[in-house]
Amino acid sequence: MNEIIRLQVGEVLTNTYIIKSKNEIIVIDPAFESERIIKEIKNLKGDIKYIINTHGHIDHISSNNDLLKEFNCQLLIHELDSKLLISPEKNLSLLFGYSYISQQADLLLKDGDKIKIGDLELKVIHTPGHTEGSISLYGDGFIFTGDTLFYDSIGRSDFPGGDEKKLFESLEKLNKIIKEDQIVYPGHGDFGYFYEIKKINPFLNII
């Protein structure tokens, strides 16, 4: 049985997800409040295998270093966003008033890659637009969409590396592959079934 825990952390309420399958754990977008995230991981009493960043902005990577120091695990990010990890300007940490440099990734992802823990398999879907290397993670019955698709909105495309045209192409791609009864877990805000999101998200009606 797979267990998914959502923590809303930091001043912009980033959704950090902790997923456990059998005795293995992955963490998606560890942001701020690293002590809280570490405590939650330890409470699960499993082995953390991967940290996955859906993209390289500070509000999705800011606890990378603390978790990597605490646990023996690997950091994964799409190959096109790896440069954001080590650039305070590109990862937007300077906008938050400080300079953050993450450890570099152990594995660079690309479209179609598969990530396995326990009985769980996540397929990497490249969904650029918010950043060049934004990804979604497609699982059995659910999908993590980072800052590409929210419950009632979409991610911004006006940051460095953003591209409105590519963002809408990514939304069209997701619209074709996400099943009606799949749960969408976004990078911010509420989560819910895709059929619910399609009813209220205006951006899915214009692609």
Image (spheres, rainbow, N blue to C red):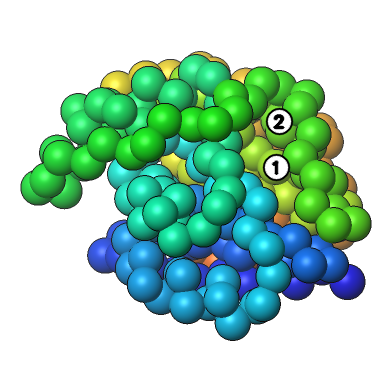
Q: Nearer the viewer, residue 115 or 167?
A: 115
What's the residue at 20%, 28% (across, down)?
Answer: 89
- Is residue 200 something that shows in the picture? no
What's the residue at 22%, 41% (across, down)?
Answer: 100
Amino acid under label 1? Leu
Lateral position of residue 117 relative to residue 32, left or right: right
Q: How would you rate the neighbour count of disc 1 (Cα within 10 Å): few for under 14, some for 14-19, many for 20 or more?
A: many
- Circle 2 residue: 125
| Figure check: 96 above or below 111 | below
Q: Which label sits on residue 137? A: 1
Q: Nearer the viewer, residue 198 or 11?
A: 11
- Is residue 7 something that shows in the picture? yes
Q: Position of residue 186 (x, y in %)?
A: 57, 54
Mark 1 vs 2, N-terminal side: 2
Q: Nearer the viewer, residue 58 or 67?
A: 67
| Figure check: 177 above or below 44 | above
**Disc 1/disc 2 C-alpha distance (Å):** 6 Å
